[in-house]
Image (spheres, helix red, strand yellow):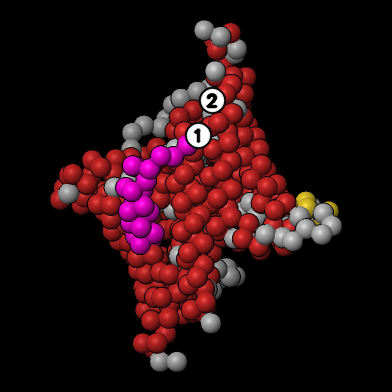
């Protein structure tokens, strides 16, 4: 397959067929927490997309040059110490979470400076992007799947479209919830319960995309 | 004040299981709750791993609490949790390889389980050691019961039985194994818990 078809396939597969929220249950907290209005949901989606893309590519670079077997840093340690260190992968989780926290800090400063209204609307969910499992999941997938570890471009496309998939899911959800506000929901189901059931029906609809993978 | 008659540690333990249940009341840790509850075995292993990390992180944070100040504390929490998750991940890969494969990336994702970071922030960084430990155990049991309740419903409907035992003649609902079944089961169970607690209050 050519490079272009490869990229198109990764993009489509990540955003629709393997949608992070609706097939892997990732990023459920913001998905339930900030999906009340379409514009806030869209802002959240953009912030998450940015953090995912940056973290995905930065952790790819770190893995490639410092952590995996045969990378420059590991080779250097082996040469200098004369020891046999196979890799530094046991540091992976700690380094990844460090990078993600740094990226979120950047986004937080940017949003507070240039979009104060969005900053107030997102509230506590903005710093909580650090603990959005979608981001760590994307970094780990990039570090573990051969087709992504080998190509920087594939990793970039994958992480960007993972973010797009998250944005799509949360904006669709916000659209449905704006309509739900006027619906007569039985009292015990109001709030998170009906949102989860709605998400279940959306997941059912997204299962239809599985047929496209062929 | 009925609450004041109970000592702090015991009250926090009980609260974690019932009134402040992480799954049904606080709606925390939703991602593993939905992802690993397709079968009972996976759910129990996940709850065990989370419990270990939660208790250890709470102990470390409670011991360090007088030195933690300002913005850096969240970073300290996260790095402590990440270190213990690395331990659990290696342990599962060494002794329970099949389960480790099955849970996959959801084991490292314990790092970003909001229950743990929430307990570090709300309780362990402010309370003495024994209270923090009791709180961690309470939340861990609450999480375990939450996961088990969802896993029982899903596994039963999907396969017509539990842990290898099968109801004869049951046609499994494949949808309950998938994401849609997870979302709907949790939604309905939360609704049920709300309904029950409303009735109790009346």
Mark 1 is surrounded, within 10 Å at the Cα level, by few (under 14), some (14 to 19) or many (20 or more) other residues, namely: some
Picture coordinates of residue A48, whole percent (x, y): 34, 57
The residue identified by callout 1 is A188
Q: Is residue A146 above or below residue A192?
A: below
Q: Residue A197 lies in magenta, yes or no?
A: no
Q: Is residue B112 left or right of residue A181?
A: right
- Name the image quarter holding the N terminus of chain A: bottom left
Q: Secondary structure at mark 1?
A: helix
- Provide the major secondary structure of the magenta segment: helix
* Closer-to-camera residue (A2/B53): A2
Q: Residue at x 49, y 28 (%)?
A: B123
Q: Residue A183 lies in magenta, yes or no?
A: yes
Q: Is residue B12 above or below residue A85?
A: above
- Residue A151 quadrant: bottom left
Q: Residue at x 63, y 51 (%)?
A: B37
* Closer-to-camera residue (A60/A115): A115
CB atoms at circles 2 and 1 under 8 Å apart? yes
Q: Is residue B198 left or right of residue A118?
A: right
* Closer-to-camera residue (B9/B197): B197
* Closer-to-camera residue (A91/B192): B192
Q: What is the chain letter for disc 1?
A: A
The residue identified by callout 2 is B198
Q: Is residue A87 left or right of residue A47?
A: right
Q: Calculate the distance from the C-alpha at mark 2 to the C-alpha at mark 1.
A: 8 Å
Q: Residue at x 76, y 55 (%)?
A: B160
Picture coordinates of residue A112, whole percent (x, y): 20, 46
Q: Which residues are magenta?
A: A166-186
Q: Is residue B148 visible?
A: yes
Q: Secondary structure at mark 2?
A: helix
- Residue A46 quadrant: bottom left
Q: What is the chain letter for disc 2?
A: B
Q: Residue at x 52, y 77 (%)?
A: A211
């Amino acid at each position: 397959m050519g490079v272009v078809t490869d990229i198109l396939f990764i993009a489509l597969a990540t955003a629709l067929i393997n949608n992070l929220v609706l097939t892997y249950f990732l990023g459920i907290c913001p998905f339930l927490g900030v999906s009340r209005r379409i514009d806030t949901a869209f802002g959240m989606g953009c912030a998450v997309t940015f953090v995912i893309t940056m973290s995905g590519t930065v952790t790819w670079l770190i893995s490639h040059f410092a952590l995996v077997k045969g990378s420059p840093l590991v080779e250097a340690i082996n040469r200098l110490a004369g020891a046999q260190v196979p890799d530094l992968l046991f540091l992976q989780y700690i380094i990844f979470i460090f990078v993600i926290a740094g990226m979120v800090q950047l986004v937080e400063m940017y949003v507070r400076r240039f979009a104060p209204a969005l900053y107030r609307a997102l509230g506590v969910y903005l710093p909580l992007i650090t603990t959005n499992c979608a981001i760590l999941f994307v970094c780990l997938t990039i570090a573990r799947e051969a087709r992504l570890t080998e190509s920087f471009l594939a990793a970039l496309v994958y992480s960007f479209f993972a973010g797009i998939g998250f944005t799509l899911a949360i904006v669709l959800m916000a659209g449905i919830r704006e309509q739900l506000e006027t619906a007569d929901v039985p009292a015990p189901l109001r709030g998170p319960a009906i949102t989860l059931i709605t998400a279940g029906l959306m997941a059912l609809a997204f299962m239809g995309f599985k047929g496209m993978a062929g | 004040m009925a609450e004041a008659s109970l000592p702090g540690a015991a009250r926090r333990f009980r609260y974690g299981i019932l009134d402040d249940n992480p799954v049904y009341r606080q709606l925390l840790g939703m991602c593993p709750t939905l992802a690993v509850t397709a079968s009972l075995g996976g759910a129990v292993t996940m709850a065990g791993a989370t419990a270990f990390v939660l208790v250890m992180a709470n102990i470390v944070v409670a011991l360090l609490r007088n030195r933690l100040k300002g913005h850096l504390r969240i970073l300290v929490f996260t790095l402590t949790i990440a270190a213990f998750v690395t331990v659990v991940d290696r342990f599962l890969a060494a002794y329970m390889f099949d389960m480790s494969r099955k849970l996959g990336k959801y084991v490292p994702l314990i790092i970003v389980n909001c229950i743990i970071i929430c307990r570090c922030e709300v309780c362990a960084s402010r309370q003495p050691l024994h209270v923090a430990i009791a709180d961690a155990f309470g939340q861990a049991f609450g999480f375990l019961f939450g996961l088990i309740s969802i896993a029982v419903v899903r596994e039963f409907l999907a396969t017509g039985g539990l842990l290898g035992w099968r109801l004869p003649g049951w046609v499994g609902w494949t949808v309950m194994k998938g994401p849609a079944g997870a979302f709907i089961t949790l939604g309905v169970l939360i609704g049920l818990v709300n309904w029950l607690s409303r009735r109790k209050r009346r």
